Amino acid sequence: MIVRYEIFYIFANRFYKKEDIMKKLKIFLPIMVAAIGIVLFSQCKKDHSCNMRLTCYYSSNGMDADSTVPFALISFDTVKYNSGLAVNPDISSVQDVSTSALGVFTYTLRYPALLIVNAVKYDTVFDETGNVLSAKKYTGTAQVQVNEGETTEKSILMVETN
């Protein structure tokens, strides 16, 4: 019986030496820890913001843009919202805003949306006594698709209406 175990011990030591196993563990263990760390701690940080940039222009015929419209009033209607809600919560808080002095309005939404943008500008000219010399109303409408991770730029052509 003793001879059998000695032969097995000699055979096992010949192929599975403790030093060889330790050398393999010293190489294999850091590689496995690094691989698991890379998989667990690396994430793709995707930009989820939905940026929108609207520019309002005066137009004589609705096809050609003239100059920008400063301080035009902008309102939004929601056509479709991803979660099926009737109103986009991002847009409901920014109703009745205006463009800047350069005719530009920018906003960042949290969710993608399909919006109808209405723009209105009243130009009234008064004389020195306060009487109205001329009153003009310019309106424009556009449909804007705001997508995730993109900046959507849209031009709104505003024509004179009665």
Image: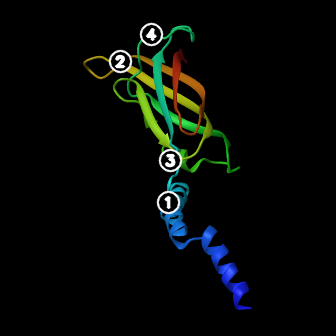
For the residues labelled 2 and 3, say whether their Cβ atoms are less than 8 Å apart. Answer: no
Structural distance between the alpha carbons of marks 3 and 4 = 41 Å
Amino acid found under the numbered disc labelled 1: Ile
Element on which disc 1 rests:
helix
Mark drawn on residue 125: 2
Question: Residue 131 vs residue 17: left or right?
Answer: left
Label 2 packing within 10 angstroms: few (<14), some (14-19), many (20+): few
**Residue 96 appears in view:** no
Nearest the viewer among 139 and 12 is 12
Horizontal and vertical percent position of residue 156: 52, 22
Of the numbered discs 2 and 1, the one sitting upstream in the chain is 1
- In the rendered view of the protein, which quadrant contains the C terminus? top right
Amino acid found under the numbered disc labelled 2: Val
Of the numbered discs 3 and 4, the one sitting upstream in the chain is 3
Q: Which residue is tagged 3?
A: 45
Structural distance between the alpha carbons of marks 1 and 4 = 70 Å
Q: Nearer the viewer, mark 3 or mark 4?
A: 3
Residue occupying the point 55% across, 55% down: 39
Horizontal and vertical percent position of residue 157: 53, 18
Q: Which residue is tagged 1?
A: 27
Residue occupying the point 58% across, 25% down: 141
